[in-house]
Image: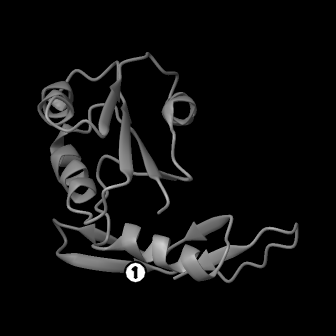
Amino acid sequence: MLKISLILPNFNGGKYLEQAIQSFLDQDYYNKELIIVDGKSTDNSHSIIEKFSTVNSNIIWIKDLDNGISSAFNIGYIYSTGDIIGYLGSDDIIYKNLFNNLNYINSWSSFDAAYFNSYTFYINEKKCILRKCPEIEFNIGANYCRW
């Protein structure tokens, strides 16, 4: 079974952070870790992270100071121990059973990257937009998986 690591760079994302973390916990998959990088938030983010990281050993809070989202991701990458490493935004929700689906596909097909369609919800406007992945061919020897 693959170990799946998600890196969540956060800065003042408290408004939706709890939902993002809960969507990670709701994955019916035990070999997973969530690495949250946040050393600078001034909103309620730190209390939310503390609440989850103290009772879930697979949620790791890295309090290093970063220089922006890419820097925070790179810091999280250093602490990642997964076979698959992914990104989770503080306002993202993971689709149910995603981790099981990745593990299943990996059981019969080797891949180096996976990318997905996504939905963007505009709450105030009461609309949802589907963003489809472009058809991309990787020609450098990488295998990829697309949903």
What amino acid type is highlighted by mark number 1? Leu
Kindly state the secondary structure of the residue where label 1 is placed.
strand
Query: What residue do we see at 40% from left, 51% from top?
Result: 88
User: Above or below — where is 15 with respect to 12?
Assistant: below
Q: Position of residue 20 (x, y in %)?
A: 25, 52
Query: What residue do we see at 78% from left, 79% from top?
Result: 137
Tell me which corner region of the image, top left, top right, bottom left or bottom right, holds residue 74. top right
Q: Position of residue 117 (x, y in %)?
A: 47, 77
Q: Position of residue 33 (x, y in %)?
A: 37, 45
User: Above or below — where is 77 with respect to 119?
Assistant: above
The reply, left or right, for residue 69 in relation to residue 138 is: left
The residue positioned farthest toward the right in the image shown: 140
The reply, left or right, for residue 40 in relation to residue 123 is: right
The residue positioned farthest toward the front in the image shown: 1
Query: What residue do we see at 57% from left, 30% from top?
Result: 78
Tell me which corner region of the image, top left, top right, bottom left or bottom right, holds residue 46. top left
Q: Does the image show residue 133?
A: no
Residue linked to disc 1: 130
User: Above or below — where is 40 with respect to 105?
Assistant: above
Tell me which corner region of the image, top left, top right, bottom left or bottom right, holds residue 107. bottom right
For the rendered model, the colour scheme is one colour
Query: What residue do we see at 31% from left, 71% from top?
Result: 95
Judging depth in this view, the residue of 132 and 94 nearest the camera is 94
Q: Position of residue 109 (x, y in %)?
A: 64, 80
